[in-house]
Amino acid sequence: MRAIAIVVLVLAAALAACDSLPFGKKQEQAPAPAVVPPPVAPPGVAPPVAGPPQVLAVPPVAPAAVALLPQPPAFEWTATPALDKIPAAPAGGMLNGNPFPVAAVVFEPGAATWRLVLGDTALESPTAATINGQFASIDLAEPPATGKTYNRPMAAGGGVFQVTPNPADPQMTVAWNTELAWVREITKWDVREYDPKGELFQDAGRASGRVAVCFKAGGRYQNSW
């Protein structure tokens, strides 16, 4: 059973093409340019005097466009996150000093516990079996429900931040295990029961609420949220 809310990010790719010689074709050498002698002034006429060199006005080159990540909401890392500190804004965060955009939010049941996942890459479909990219995941001791606030004090375990250690290889991610604390509130839980006669992975409905997850600095990573 799954519930998912997705914000779609649109990526643009630019391709450059270049000409090349066909294999095995001999490239013809261009003839050398003819050398023209300077003009000779007639008798009694002074030769022309070269003036100052001309300066060509070159228009300034516009800087290349830089894709900027969406700025996170106004929130500061804390060891004791509280609901009244969560801004009324779309989900977003910081990972090791850099903005962490949230493109997918998933509540997912497991064998023993539920988990809440916030990822930086939109899912291919609401029932995709794999969450790609980087994501923060927290374990929930009981099924989500409205009308109750849940919080977890700073401690080890209970969640993970799946991160990309090498930006040059974004497909490879590793689990950053550290102490974390979180608080969450479900304001809307419009979810159907799992249909045993349906598909294995099911889109069960939609949810709304607030959540703040704070990961404590450790190893090569700064405080993140």
Image (cartoon, rainbow, N blue to C red):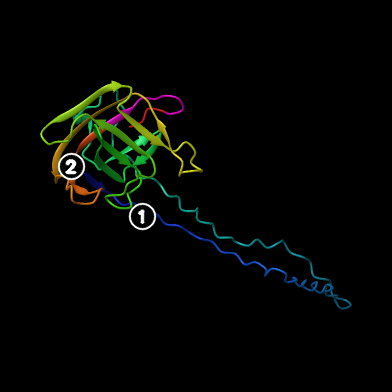
Q: Determine the residue located farthest toward the front in the rendered image.
A: 197
- Answer with mark 1 or mark 2, whichever residue precedes in sequence: 1
Q: Residues within 10 Å of mark 1 (few under 14, many from 20)?
A: few
Instruction: Using the image, determine if residue 13 lies above or below residue 91.
Output: below
Instruction: Using the image, determine if residue 43 lies above or below residue 161.
Output: below
As rendered, which of 145 and 53 lies closer to the eye?
Answer: 145
Label 1: element kind = loop
Q: Residue at x 65, y 61 (%)?
A: 55
Residue 189 rendering spot, x and y as whole percentages: 14, 42
Residue 91 rendering spot, x and y as whole percentages: 27, 41
Q: Nearer the viewer, mark 1 or mark 2?
A: 2
Q: Determine the residue located farthest toward the right in the rendered image.
A: 43
Residue range corresponding to the magenta coloring = 213-221
Q: Quadrant of residue 105?
A: top left
Residue 187 rendering spot, x and y as whole percentages: 14, 39
Instruction: Using the image, determine if residue 220 lies above or below residue 107.
Output: above
Q: Residue at x 22, y 49 (%)?
A: 203
Q: Residue at x 75, y 71 (%)?
A: 26
The secondary structure that dominates the magenta segment is loop
Q: Residues within 10 Å of mark 2 (few under 14, many from 20)?
A: some
Residue type, label 1: Val
Residue 88 rendering spot, x and y as whole percentages: 21, 39
Q: Quadrant of residue 224?
A: top left
Residue 208 shows which numbered tag? 2
The residue that label 1 is drawn on is: 10
Residue type, label 2: Ser
Q: Tell me: 191 left or right of 41.
A: left
As rendered, which of 72 and 210 lies closer to the eye?
Answer: 210
